[in-house]
Image (cartoon, rainbow, N blue to C red):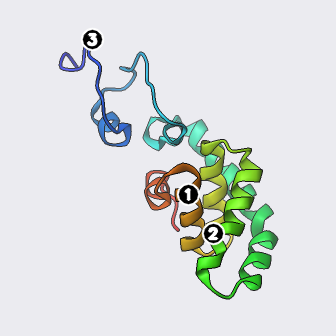
Amino acid sequence: MNEYLNKIICGDCLDIMPDLPDKSIDNSIGTAQRLLYWCMMTEKQKNFVKQTLAETTNLLKDVVKDIEESIPLSRGHYAKYMSVISSASKNQPHAGMLIALALVKAGANFQGVSDAVKLLYQYDLSRIASRLEVEV
């Protein structure tokens, strides 16, 4: 613990925070992606995220079906998925990540959704899914 006491640690919290002791952070400055940092959540928070993801997935199944049937090539999916993610999340990255994961779980073209996430938020959807223990 002393190696971190009274220090500013600069880096990717997804890499650094797992090594920090529980309840040892006084302040963190970062992007909204870090709001989904799974290993720091309580079980109640994790269950809330899982429930929200499941409910959102069910709500988006018809939207995904319409998009997937309307575009024959995967490179055209990202624009439609970007529109869904940005309008549904009101451009809030943490909400956008959940919506993106729900789209994929509802059957959306992963590459299309991943491209949309990269353009909107500059995040790697595979990495977010892995951190949240969501299979995509």
Write the residue at 46% across / 57% down.
124
Instruction: Count how many numbered circles sit on residues in the image.
Output: 3
User: Which of the marked residues, 2 or 3, is nearer the chain's N terminus?
Assistant: 3
Residue 118 or 94: which is nearer the viewer?
A: 118
Tell me, for residue 6, which label it has, or none: 3
- Say what secondary structure mark 1 lies in: helix
User: Which of the marked residues, 1 or 2, is nearer the chain's N terminus?
Assistant: 2
Position in image of residue 32 (x %, y %): 55, 37
Work out which residue is located at the far bottom of the displayed protein and give it.
72
Marks 2 and 3: CB-CB under 8 Å? no
Mark 2–mark 3 Cα distance, whole angstroms, equals 44 Å
- Tell me if 110 is positioned left or right of 9 in this view: right
Tell me, for residue 119, which label it has, or none: 1
In the rendered structure, which amino acid carries the disc numbered 2? Tyr
Write the residue at 68% across / 45% down.
91
Marks 1 and 2: CB-CB under 8 Å? yes
On screen, residue 73 above or below 119 = below
Q: Mark 1 or mark 3: which is in front?
A: 1
Write the residue at 54% across / 65% down.
114
Tell me, for residue 11, which label it has, or none: none
User: According to the image, label 2 marks what residue?
Assistant: 78
Classify 10 Å Cα crowding around label 1: few (below 14), some (14-19), many (20 and above).
few
Quadrant for the N terminus in the image: top left
- Name which quarter of the figure residue 130 lies in: bottom left
Position in image of residue 107 (x %, y %): 66, 75
